[in-house]
Amino acid sequence: MSSEFTFRERTQTELVLRRFLRHKAAVISLVLFLLVVLFAYAGPLIWQYNYDTITDDLSQSPSFGHPFGTDMIGHDTFAQVMRGTQQSLKIALAIALIGTVLGSLWGAVAGLYRGKLDFLMMRIVDIVLTLPTIAVAAAVAAQGVGRSQWWAIAVILGALTWPYVSRVVRGVVLSLREQEFIEAARALGGGNARIVLRHLLPNALGAITVTATLTIAAGILGEAALSFLGVGVQAPDTSLGLLVSLNRDAVNTRPWLFYFPGLFIILIALTINFIGDGLRDAFDPKQTRVRQ
Amino acid sequence: MFAYVVRRMLAAIPVLIIASFLAYALVALSGDPLEPLKLRNPPAPQQTIDLETQRLDLDDNIFVRYWHWLTGVLHGDFGQSVQSSYDIGANLGRASAVTLRLVLVAVLLALVLAVLTGVFSAVRQYSRFDYTMTFVGFVFLAMPSFWIAIVLKDLAVRYNKATGTTVFYTIGETSQNYASLSPIGKFGDILGHLVLPTIALALISYAAWSRYQRAAMLEVLNSDYVRLARAKGLTWRKVLIRHVLRTALIPLVTVTALDIAGILGGAIITETVFNWNGLGRMLLTGVARADTNAVAGWLLLAGIVVIAFNVIADALYAVLDPRIRHE
């Protein structure tokens, strides 16, 4: 039977997926991350308390009724962590989206056109990178339009994140454009649009996806830092960073108030970093050394 | 080399001018420092508001205001603060001395730990040590700096309480009685207060840097010239230090310089946790008051520090890689 020896052609997507599924830490992380998302978005629909519900139970340690305990006003910490995770995730995803889109376009244009335009665009990147993100974000977020609105925080942090993405994308585009298959496509009569859309973008997509993933982790930590300094999300709304900040003096006396939101920040950032690591290996198997 | 460093610093001036203008404009346009006066109940008299507008140079357009500020700074005058008795220049000097010693010690600690971990992880690739440190690195990378700082502080407080001593200082950059201490006592006091914030600040950078160092070591270890060096009969120790480590330090130098702005940001947070009176508090106070001159001066100083570190990094390339010569 000839069918025994025929192979079905695997598409690029299938290959990437197969390689990703082989990265154990990344797959476990993806499952954990999806559970966190489910917890944040579906949880509040089921859970009996809202994040702003004030119960009669004051400063209780974790129990069956309040898995993460309560604070001194009577808020259920479990519900607050749900809401905080929701807000933090929303902000982090928005930061990653803004940073990735802006940064990819910026880097791709600079890498493609090179010369003076590239020089100018990259000096602008240098200028933004000279200033400490947290300091600039704090300065703007404390005043400004829509202060302490979630989208304002996302816009500010996103506007400070794109330079990192643009550097990566520019590097990828610069090296891709010199490769033989681009030259071949040009020799075969491929126009600029075709080369960019059919060859450059699909090949740069891996690097962009990995960077975007890591930007989410940076976004979670950035939002947490801003809220910690008191210029991010404000009460009565909440976020993971704000919860840690508000409860920092309770670390000794009512540790559950401090540790649970903190552990969620770490869990999200950790899983996203592992997913990014898995994606990097999946998109670019050349970088992976043989695993034992 | 000296001429090269001077030239690089001069080339950084346009970058600094544009960056400081952006910072100045952002802060000036995003807040109104006279808001508390205007919203006061009863409202402040118009005369007071006019005088404050005059004093803070608020009635010109942003370009004129920036020009006044910049020419002032070049003459050593950082401009008027919203709070009239606050001397911005003097405070910048005092606060940066406090914060930069934290940043420098933390960077050094993180570098030493990162190089050691990276070298051992790479030499014993896929050993138990390598796997453990990889996991530890990932965990530290995922931790917010303020969280590590608070946990460290809590552990120290518990330890102090349990033993009835003050082994760890958890509040402030110096003790209350600092002024009355002898020079040696002062030095010890500063060191004692540095321990916890330095560890908190260093751990985050250490995590990322040890990963870079490990990757760079592996790349060099697998290169042809290292095989040649071994084949010539050089000892493993000599090969590792003179040939592998020296080359593998170059990427780390790049990453360190790139991360300095982030570390300055981390220092703001660490200082807040440990109640230091450094650049962190200065920035947050300035931001709360919408104090354009203070915040812009702060950001200018941060820009100078970041660029200085980048120039040092470029100079170090030449030391590490004999092929690079800065004429």
Image (cartoon, grey):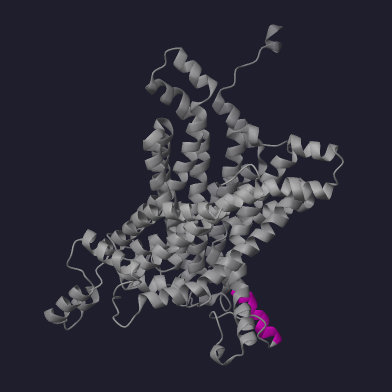
The answer to if B255 sits in the magenta stretch is no
> Which of the pair B170/B70 is nearer the observer?
B70
As drawn, A240 above or below A219: below
> Which of the pair B262/A142 is nearer the observer?
B262
Residue drawn at x 46%, y 37% as measured from the top left: A170
**As drawn, which residue projects farthest toward the bottom?**
B180
Q: Position of residue B126 (x, y in %)?
A: 76, 45
- What is the span of residues highlighted in magenta in the rendered image? B153-163
Residue drawn at x 45%, y 71% as measured from the top left: B280
Query: Does residue A263 appear left or right of residue B217 in this picture?
Result: left
| Number of numbered tags placed on the structure image | 0
Q: Is residue A62 visible?
A: no
The answer to if B161 sits in the magenta stretch is yes
Q: Is residue B298 visible?
A: yes
The rendered magenta stretch, by its main secondary structure, is classed as: helix
**As drawn, which residue projects farthest toward the left?**
B46
The image quadrant that residue B287 belongs to is: bottom left
Q: Position of residue B49 (x, y in %)?
A: 17, 77
